[in-house]
Amino acid sequence: MSSEDREAQEDELLALASIYDGDEFRKAESVQGGETRIHLDLPQNFKIFVSGNSNECLQNSGFEYTICFLPPLVLNFELPPDYPSSSPPSFTLSGKWLSPTQLSALCKHLDNLWEEHRGSVVLFAWMQFLKEETLAYLNIVSPFELTMGSPKKVQRRMAQASSNTELDFGGATGSDIDQEEVVDERAVQDVESLSSLIQEILDFDQAQQIKCFNSKLFLCNICFCEKLGSECMYFLECRHVYCKACLKDYFEIQIRDGQVQCLNCPEPKCPSVATPGQVKELVEAELFARYDRLLLQSTLDLMADVVYCPRPSCQLPVMQEPGCTMGICSSCNFAFCTLCRLTYHGVSPCKVTAEKLMDLRNEYLQADEANKRFLEQRYGKRVIQKALEEMESKEWLEKNSKSCPCCGTPIEKLDGCNKMTCTGCMQYFCWICMGSLSRANPYKHFTDPASPCFNRYVFPELLLSAVFWYLICRPQAQEVLALFREFSYIFKYFLLYSFHSFLSYILSYMHFLENEFYDENVLSEDFL
């Protein structure tokens, strides 16, 4: 090795080490050589398309995947002693997602580049070509279709690489490279099968996106602080970014409140939802267990064919057979009715408790004809009719009667005074305030000035009737009738004040009409 070649090799390796980081370039320790990993720059929204053939069933066949990164091309090289003056570098080129035919075409072009740069270093030119021009040179466009060939056929063609046989294992359409071209022995496709290749591509793309995300700065729209991506998290659907500390508090509050279906993006009107993996990364194990349990329960609640075992000690989900009202718990073997959640009763109608009668009546009245028939079939038409009648009776009693303060018996008052006697327990009580009255002197309640019902013993309608007949007998009948037209205004006055005050008001008004003087105290005593 001449000193000039040696110096050129050392300078080139040193330059490559300074240009590329440790993930892209690594110098070999034992020989003059190394390994470079070339990451291609893909256009936006680059898609790969998976297809299969009749010989092998591929799970991901027929799907398109949008990716940002493809696994790198790996160039392993060794510098001969007379490089760069005479000989080119020895190399192998490998790639997971390119066919051996496409890799062979790249190897041939690297040879052409060496011929153009003969006598000078060429590794950097090779790496730049592979990074920037591979897609255009192979005429690869989106969507990039990965086709599946026969593994046996691949092995046979790899063994017969010197022949002009087409090799289509892992090949890509969209390339105008001659498929009859001989496969270069320096082209290596280090992948077991197309199925494993798809998963490797998707895993690599996700890892690279996370790596790029972690190295950037983002503004959290909750705390309005700028943080590295490694301290942040983004929602997969909308790509909105928030810091992990804010999302942790947000998730914990929602989970403690039982709102596991509301772990949405905090951005207003954004429908994106956090994945269980993101929730698990942020919250503690105990809270995540609660989240997982509530999420499963809410999902089962949305399934029409899933009911829960009614036993409080069990409560496990039970699958319901179509058209059948019987459910059998697989854990405790309890057979129950899926409608009323009681022990299975066959064709007999479901039993209705007293507490459910009101709800049943309201549900029946608001239901359409189809739901009414369903309720009649479930509970029985007689039960529905009974519920309607009982609720109507209850509403009438609440509107037209009052309950005895002693025994609760409903009492209706048609007319008479305000001292009432219960027909059930014979207890005296006041109809106005519903207070119990003394059996020895029940009228004291109406004559005691400290009582709220003082001088309100007679029912107002009866009192007005008596006053009417007293006054109608007076000679001034027409004036009396005019007076009664004013009763609608003075009736409220009577309810608020005592009977004597009421009579005083009437006598004063009569005096005004007749220009006569009435002794109101005498009239009051006579009338009483």
Image (cartoon, rainbow, N blue to C red):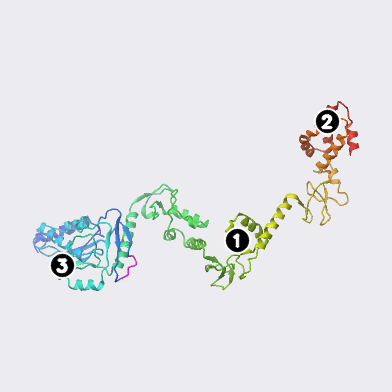
Q: Which residue is mark 1?
A: 373
Mark 2: which secondary structure? helix
Res. 478 mark: 2
Near-viewer residue (34 or 255) = 255
- Residue 157 can be seen in this image: yes
Q: How many marks can you see?
A: 3
Quadrant of residue 490 within the rendered picture = top right
Position of the N terminus, as image quadrant, is bottom left
Q: Which residues are magenta?
A: 56-60
Marked residue nearer the N-terminal end (2 or 3): 3
Q: Is residue 59 magenta?
A: yes
Q: Is residue 245 left or right of residue 466?
A: left
Q: Mark 2 touching mark 3, by CB under 8 A?
A: no
Q: Is residue 151 left or right of residue 267?
A: left
Near-viewer residue (138 or 239) = 138
Task: Return the x and y of residue 213 as percentages of the image width and height.
Answer: 34, 54
Res. 182 mark: 3
Amino acid on which the number 3 mark rests in the picture: Val
Task: Return the x and y of residue 400 as percentages of the image width and height.
Answer: 75, 50
Q: Is residue 121 magenta?
A: no
Mark 1: which secondary structure? helix
Task: Return the x and y of residue 211 as percentages of the image width and height.
Answer: 32, 57
Q: Is residue 294 left or right of residue 448?
A: left
Q: Residue at x 36, y 53 (%)?
A: 229
Q: CA distance from mark 1 to mark 3?
A: 78 Å
